[in-house]
Image (spheres, grey):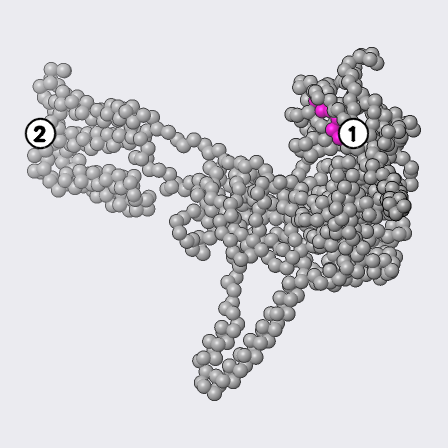
Amino acid sequence: MHLWQATVPFCLLASAAIPTAAAAAWGFTDATVAVQPKGAGINGGYKESFSSSKPLGNPVAFTGADTLRVTLTTQEGSSAKRPHQAFLLLKDGHTGLDISYPFTVKENGKSRVELTQKELPLQFLTLPEPIDARIVIGGFGSSDAYDHSVFKLAVERDVNIPIPTAEAPRYGKLPEIHHTFKDDPTNPPIIITLAFVGAVLAALPVLAGLWLFLGVNLSHLPAALKSAPVPHAIFLASLTAIEGIFFLYYTSWNLFQILPAVAAAGAVAFVSGSRALGEVQGRRFAGLR
Amino acid sequence: MYNFPSPPPPPHLCHSFFASSYSIPEAQSARRNSFMMRWCLALLLCCFLAVVNALSSSGSRLLVVLDESAEKSAYSTLWSDLKERGYDISFETPKSNSLSLFQHGERAYDHLLILPPKSKGLGPNLTPKNVLDFMGQDGNIILALSGKSSTSSAISSLLLEFDIHLSNDRSAVVIDHFNYDTVSAAEKHDVLLLNRPEALRSDVKAFFDGEGVLALPRVAPQTLGNTSPLVSPVLQAPATAYAYNPKEEIPSAEDIEATGSQLNIVSALQSRNSARLTILGSVEALEDKWFSASVKAPNGKKISTANREFAKQLTAWTFKETGVLKVGKVEHHLATDGEVSADDLNPTIYRIKNETVFSIELSEYAYDKWVPYEVPAGDELQLEFTMLSPFHRLALQPTKKTETSTIYSVQFVTPDQHGIFSFRVNYKRPFLTNIEEKHEVTVRHFAHDEYPRSWAISGGWVWIAGLWSVIGGFLAFVIVWLYSAPAADKTKKMQ
């Protein structure tokens, strides 16, 4: 008796608890995914059925002109019912992109969605891996909503058809730029340079040899130094000095340093030169030249 | 030119220095004076610091536009939090005649918080043009929306100016059958429970992240245009969310405009002048009730919301307490060993192919003080050396850190192109105020005496040898001409 009294409320409690514990959940049956190429008949192309417990193993190929059609019957618990939300959700795990295509649902839960590649966002057309296709079914109240991956969608497109870029301006770091410098000037191989330098410098001995061959001599030097030693010495020295000043200009001096020096040496060369050349003229008049 | 003036010596040091040079009786009174002075100074400094501590980097005058004062009490925690952070809050109703964002052509407030009005529109003083002008003068705005009633077309057209779009009928509410609060919205599923948002991208600093769950009742969703880099999402709806008009029973497939993460719950815009606008989809999330509510997701545990912390982050960012960058010293000079003297700093002219060092000092404002700014891991602070287009774009590396700033620098060779160049740092990132530094310098080519000498160029040796052999030949010819006697025999034979 006491046992009965104790168990009755307990049983009542348990029976009341059962429906809430096993709250109805949204789901679907009779689901098929079909890919219908352009121009194929109503039953042409790929068609495969799947269920909420058994997703498709192989990715569904979806090429340029195909129409993807998913049909199913939505259920709350085990009875067909129209949900508030019935989406085909495409989601890319890597980039986190997601987009949903709502099913057209009838009162009896029969739902259908059709999709072509034109309706896909551009970003989905160039993904390297198949997109995760999920079915999302949900409604108000306490029934658990349904959201599971049912198949993979492999978007295949003709690589020859360019797609517009999906680049949008966003602030971020830009690619680095390093200035490309012009090449430094280069020299020819030093051997060649030295060979030509040798050829140029060889002109002097060749010249000396030719002169000697023609009988060049310095026989008048004692006579010249005897009759006008100072003008000759100074004239030659000033000529050498002018060349020396040019050498300094080449190595270190600037124009304003050499101008007065050259003017001075030039004046000296002019005066001493006229004397020295007068002596040379005297030798010519004497018939020595 | 870009140096800060050297700081004057601290006042108390000056005082003690002068005091010590007085004679003894005078020194005592002087010391007393300096003591008083020091106290005054310290007191002043304290006041100054207290004011600075509690302020945003761009002012404290906050105008809250709300419908009725009765509504005001629902958000009392928010107001007290804001007051605690130093804001000086004024409340106005949209229809009030005294409401004006400008006074004598200047901003009358630094920040604006607009709660959704019950009436149509925001009244004659908050036209889209006025609000845009307010932002044009560096005013910051938080605009809260609500999915409870339809948003007015005035707000919708204001948001259109920013490329932020509301749903077509302006009365959509975000529903998610997976992330809702089972305590308060067991039937309608219109109170979203979301984690606080992480960084927008891996190279963007997170200003709104943290532990905890946000409760967002009756969210009016926004979608963002794709063409503007100025708008960025702060908090996006989960992938399974969708928006629908609660007045319609079941949305038909055509009525669904945007779904999942395309729906923004909180979005932000920072204009080119760094004025900020935040759109908060759910005004109720700021209410006291939701600051301390305990919520439970389906199949989750009962937890309390993090709305209060999020509201702090959101207001702090919008009102420029966070994400504000400041440029300190900008220096450039020729790369040398050791210290650079002040004369050699920031020269106006460089030569091509000079080794040059550029450095820039950056600070970031964090609630009440300047701290060293650190570039996020995936990001780079870049220096461009430009003449019309960049010749160099190089990453600046942090080289030194002070108490309030980080110094970034880079060494590079000026390009082999002379002209008027500029050092440019153009650092624009989501959620950070814009930095645009441009410092012009001349890059000249080699002067005539800076080229290598001709004897150093081996290819020129042939010509040099030719020159000097001519000179030697000339001198030899002069001597021969002056002193050579005719070679009598040979000439006779030749004749």
User: Mark 2 highlights which residue?
Assistant: A219
Tell me which chain the residue with mark 1 is part of: A
Asked if the residues shown at circle 1 and circle 2 are in contact, with their CB atoms under 8 angstroms apart, the answer is: no
Circle nearer the N terminus (1, 2)? 1
Q: Is residue A71 visible?
A: no
Along the line of sight, the residue nearer the viewer: B460 or B428: B428
Q: Amino acid at mark 2?
A: Ser
Residue at x-position 83% and y-position 22%: A30
Residue at x-position 75% and y-position 39%: B238
User: Is B434 on the left or on the right of A256, as rendered?
Assistant: right
Tell me which chain the residue with mark 2 is part of: A
**Callout 1: helix, strand or loop?**
strand
Q: Amino acid at mark 1?
A: Ile
| Image position, residue A149 (x, y; %) | 74, 28
Residue at x-position 51% and y-position 81%: B31
- The segment highlighted magenta reads A148-155
Q: Which circle marks residue A135 in the picture?
A: 1
Along the line of sight, the residue nearer the viewer: B485 or B6: B6
User: Is B58 on the left or on the right of B175, as rendered?
Assistant: left
